[in-house]
Amino acid sequence: MSSSPSTLRPDPPIRVALADDHPIVLDGLEQLFRLEPDITVVARCRNADEALRAVRSQVPDVLVLDLLMPGGGGLELLRAMGDKDRRTRIILLTAVVDDDQLLEAIRLGAQGVVLKDMAPQLLVDAIREVHAGGQWLEQGLGGRALRRLLSREKRASEAARLLSSREREIVRLVAAGLRNRAIADRLSISEGTVKVHMHNIYEKLDVNGRIELTNYARENGLI
């Protein structure tokens, strides 16, 4: 007897929450996502407080968040989110954004940034990309330069984890051109102690000499 073919279950839709203080924007976004069979809207929020409550009660896969809203916008919400809230991935939807805001948003955990004047389909694509674990940064937002900056910050964080706080301090003084005796005087330690620290720094970062150390520090954001 032949067995019947197994039935494949479709993937559950991406659960999306929307946060924007303009009802017309919320209506437009909800209408947009109704056309997408793999996306469902689970919450509509008018401010950051409502959005935070929706994240904690509904646990959406993705929150599409206006950067600027009365009473606290996207950055304030990101700062308020705890570790458990990070199950929800964040896409900022904004009319304008400067580099400082953009970088701060990414540092605080936003995985995507989409401009409001972009084609609606790009927001749909961004939701799918971010839900799948990716990142979405529009080229119009200086995405390439931002990615380089974020990559540099990641390298700096990784390099910093290899060194103690005293070793990082010594690296900065070496890069500033100070010799061992001057470093010892600056830190009120012996020159011998500085030499021990230098040896450990060379070993941890796999560099040889002060010039190579200085170049490494510059390339990896230690200075």
Image (spheres, rainbow, N blue to C red):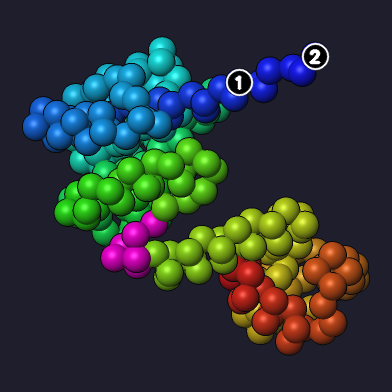
* Location of mark 2 (residue): 1
On screen, residue 110 versus residue 209, left or right, reads left
Q: Image height check: is 121 above or below 142?
A: above
Q: CA distance from mark 2 to mark 1?
A: 18 Å
The furthest residue to the bottom: 211
Q: Is the Cβ of the residue at disc 2 closer than 8 Å to that at disc 1?
A: no
For this orientation, the residue located farthest to the left is 24
Which amino acid is tagged 1? Thr
Count of number-bearing discs: 2
Tell me where the magenta segment starts and ends, as one range.
137-142
Coordinates of residue 124 in the picture (x, y in percent):
33, 43
Is residue 185 shown to the viewer in this render? no
Q: Which mark is drawn over residue 7?
A: 1
The quarter of the displayed image where residue 61 is located: top left
- The answer to whether residue 94 is left or right of residue 150 is left
In front: 86, or 199? 86
Q: Is residue 100 above or below residue 218?
A: above
Viewer-closest of 129 and 158: 129
Rendered location of residue 10, percent (x, y): 52, 26
